[in-house]
Amino acid sequence: MYKPLEEKIWALKVDSEVYIETPCNIQDVTIGRNTKVGRYSDISRTTIGNNCSIGKNCIIINSEIKDNCTIDDSSIVKDCFIAKGTTINSFCQLLSCNTEEFEVIDAFSKR
């Protein structure tokens, strides 16, 4: 039986021009200006910089994402530091890691 995602958005600090598609689960998150979050994403205890794009169905927990980053659909980022300008392609799994500035992480990568 299909159960729709229960939308929860609380303890959220956002700058101007932030676009959050619903439904989403966002808890204890700071989001910089001109940033987009795709629907069905689950984000908690995280800071997201300016000019970022978070795809649909992403899970981001306890991480810091610097400015100008892209995290494509269905990626998981947990306990990570994502450096400025990083691109994380779809279906990646990053756990307890750091990225370099402007790094591109191939789709389906695991770290």
Image: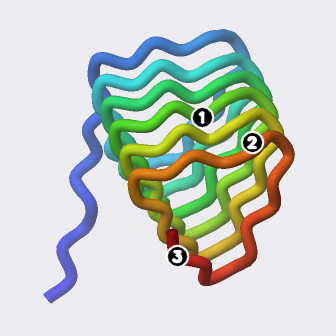
Q: Residue under label 1, please give it.
A: 65
Distance from the alpha carbon under mark 3 to that under mark 2: 18 Å
Which is nearer the eye, 93 or 71? 93
Q: Is residue 111 above or below residue 2?
A: above
**Mark 3 falls on what kind of element?**
loop
Q: Residue at x 56, y 62 (%)?
A: 56
Q: Is residue 58 above or below residue 84?
A: below
Task: Report if the CB atoms under discs 3 and 2 are less than 8 Å apart.
Answer: no
Q: Quadrant of residue 82?
A: top right
Q: Quadrant of residue 95?
A: bottom left
Q: In x, y percent, where is residue 105? A: 73, 66
- Disc 1 marks which amino acid? Ile
Label 1 crowd (10 A; few <14 / some 14-19 / many >=20): many
Q: Residue under label 3, please give it.
A: 110
Task: Report if the CB atoms under discs 1 and 2 are less than 8 Å apart.
Answer: yes
Distance from the alpha carbon under mark 1 to that under mark 3: 18 Å
- Disc 3 marks which amino acid? Lys
Q: Specify the label residue 69 is tagged with.
A: 2
Q: Quadrant of residue 46?
A: top left
Q: In x, y percent, where is residue 43? A: 38, 43
Distance from the alpha carbon under mark 1 to that under mark 2: 7 Å
**Mark 2 falls on what kind of element?**
loop
For marks 3 and 2, the one nearer the N-term is 2
Q: Residue at x 26, y 38 (%)?
A: 8
- Disc 2 marks which amino acid? Cys
